[in-house]
Amino acid sequence: MRVEETTPFKTERAGETFYFCSEHCLHTFMKDSKATHSNQKAHSCCGGHEEHARTAPTAPPPAPKKSCCSHPAESVQPPAEAKYYCPMCPGVASDEPGDCPKCGMALERNPSWKPNAKTIYTCPMHPEVEQDHPGDCPKCGMPLEPKEIVAEAEEEETDHEAADMSRRFWIGALLTLPVLVLAMWEMISGDSLRSWLPVTIDNWIQFAFSTPVVLWAGWPFFVRGARSIRTWNLNMFTLIAIGVGAAYGYSVVALLFPDVFPASFRAHGRVPLYFEAAAVITVLVLLGQMLEAKARSRTGAAIKALLSQAAKTARVIRDGEEKEVPVTEVMKGESLRVRPGEKVPVDGVILEGQSSLDESMITGEAMPVQKAMGDRVTGATVNQTGSFLMRAERVGKETMLAQIVDMVAQAQRSRAQIQRLVDKVSAYFVPAVVVVAVLTFIAWSIFGPEPRYVYALVNAVAVLIIACPCALGLATPMSIMVGVGRGAQAGVLVKNAEALETMEKVTTLIVDKTGTLTEGKPRLTKVIAAKGFSEDQLLQLAASLEAQSEHPLASAIVRGAKERNVQLSKPGGFDSVTGGGVVGQVEGRDLIIGKARFLSDRNVRGMEQFQLQAEQLQQDGNTVMFVGVAGAVAGILAVSDPIKESTVDVIHELHQLGLKVVMMTGDNEHTARAVARQLNIDEVHAGVEPKDKHRHVQQLREKGEVVAMAGDGINDAPALAAANVGIAMGTGTDVAIESAGLTLLKGDLRGILKAIRLSRGVMRNIRQNLFFAFIYNSLGIPIAAGLLFPFFGILLSPMIASAAMSLSSVSVVGNALRLRKIELSRTGEGDQLSRAK
């Protein structure tokens, strides 16, 4: 390792100057007191490894060395997979920063290291299907999508799929057009082609143009269909491959070997061909696949929008210099400089400076949040006014943004209970359609008019083509994907689809008081002074003493004094009595602050004059503290945790949505009842120990209630897990978030309203999709089989069946995409949920 001669870490031995890279290496070298003796090996700075030792010179001293540890600099090549390596010791590598276990040097970052870019692909309809390369799902035939979404990569993959289908569609459509015109000429123009185009040439032209359409443009359908039969996971492509294959194969045989067909296959003396049906069906299915691919790409728009929020680079302070590096190279513990207008690169803590940050991407609130030294900052939020220095604490996949993206992606791949019912139906659907097609062929070949076998073939193909299990399979996953993404944009993170489904059915909501219904920060609400004291004077004495206390109520009194611009004095003494109050001296006067009993036990006079006022304040939800000066009551101070401004409206909305609201708090009965009265809470449980919350949830469920529980602490985790739906406040602990099915990024009741609206909107959308898919197949298959022919003479062309089948899938996806526009922030509209615009 080369070391500059200007380094402060150097020493002389036997007239020779040695240079070191660090203080550690220098001290290690200095430990060897025998290093000056000739013919003895000196310990190297790397801990005395044999390969790093040197013999003291007997010849004249050489020129000053420039390599660490006095041995020649050698180039150590780091392993390609190593994120950190030792430049001195070959083979030492680590995924985390630290010191070399051999020489003690700080490990260096490998400049050639790249994050593991291996992408896992999965099926949106069958999340259990995973592989390390793109392809089609072996169960349903849908193209696989990246499991871990990266904005650029996913867009590239989706564009590739849509582009491939688009290319096949347009070329196929161009080749199909002349085939369709030739087949439909007499119907279009009323003139016969036979006067200028012999039937044999007409047939061969149709064959020439339709063959590349079916065998090239439609080749993916045959590959997927063959795989579905081989694995016995029958799906939409099974039906398409059989239907198109039957129409095309029959036409090829009829063209090449017309004499093998009996008279029952002939019309007007010749065997009819269906090249146009095979080609048009293929093109229409391609159209549906192309539109579906483009529509599906928009279901991930919410995650892409989140990913686009991330900073691309960071200003890292290394070796006293500010360097701009890709955010992927930022290490834990490094100091970062964030300038006005820049995005915070990673999660961390401010070391120097202050600023206001736009945290709307996390909380949904547009108002900037003031940040100063010691405050935590979140990656991807926007620095607005000031410049600050921060320490990186969570990088890469540990950042909040990365965890949000991962949670959303997992939720989009999760399955709702209703999907299991659909899966059971779908498992029997395709075999049933094949059986119906066979029965249709048999019935028409026996009872149909001449040419019976032609009618039998056409109607059997129409049955195969019109059936659309894809619409059935897409109905739930598409709605879940779009709904989860929409929730993420609104600050509602869905852990799994089952929680989203259950949220719609919730009848009882359990909430905590502190921090959920209230602001969670006590505030001074009332100052009542005795004769001889003004309010400011009383507050000045009390706040001066309470400034020495760390109790939340003391902090509220001090903040209240500062808000009134009251100047504090330095107390002469201070003592805190647990569960009682504080005593001390301010401006030479003895002071005592605390509960009524605490002052009474110390014989403070005049307590009775404030008793009625204290009781009234307590009934209104205030905590009352008495202030005694020189043995007599000087007044009372009331502190309360104010109700959030939005809480009253939200509780009213929840009642309109049909929910019963239960407040469960560890606070005293008086305070809890006072808050419940103001908010019209249905049921109150006060003085509840954390261990009892779980029991209360179970009791409500035993009564038949569908319970949603909102919590934010570790002690809430068992109750969150016991509820039908656990709702974690984003301001809470990781344990609470892990135990919950839904997470609200902003710890606010309005998020619960959004979650309910989202759940009801998604489930309504799923039911619409399923209704459409079931009705479409229930009506389409009998019509295609010719059920209406005896009564109305109506038959369904395979080409019309193909168009209907393609549009059914597209319509399901299109209906799901409407959820992107669902409004979740309305108030005052009761149960009339927002409809997509």
Image (cartoon, rainbow, N blue to C red):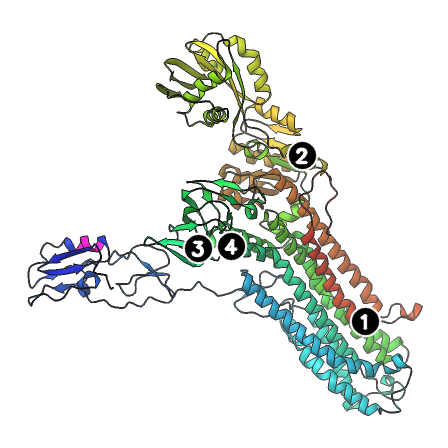
Cα distance between the residues tagged 2 and 1: 53 Å
Examine the rendered structure and indicate whether residue 481 appears above or below residue 160: above
- Mark 2 Cα within 10 Å, few/some/many (few <14, many 20+)? some
Q: Main secondary structure of the magenta part?
A: helix
Cα distance between the residues tagged 1 and 3: 57 Å
> Which badge, 2 or 3, is on the more N-terminal residue?
3
Give the residue drawn at x 41%, y 10%.
630
Mark 1 lies on residue: 800
- Mark 4 Cα within 10 Å, few/some/many (few <14, many 20+)? some
In screen coordinates, is 623 left or right of 502? left
Front-most of 297 and 289? 297
Q: Find residue 649 and name its label.
A: 2
- Mark 1 Cα within 10 Å, few/some/many (few <14, many 20+)? some
Front-most of 41 and 374? 374
Magenta stretch: give its range: 24-28
Labels 3 & 4 near each other (Cβ < 8 A): no
Labels 2 & 3 near each other (Cβ < 8 A): no
- 3 vs 4, front mark: 3
Cα distance between the residues tagged 3 and 4: 11 Å
Q: Quadrant of the N terminus?
A: bottom left
Give the residue drawn at x 91%, y 82%.
190
Please name the amino acid that badge 4 sits on.
Ala
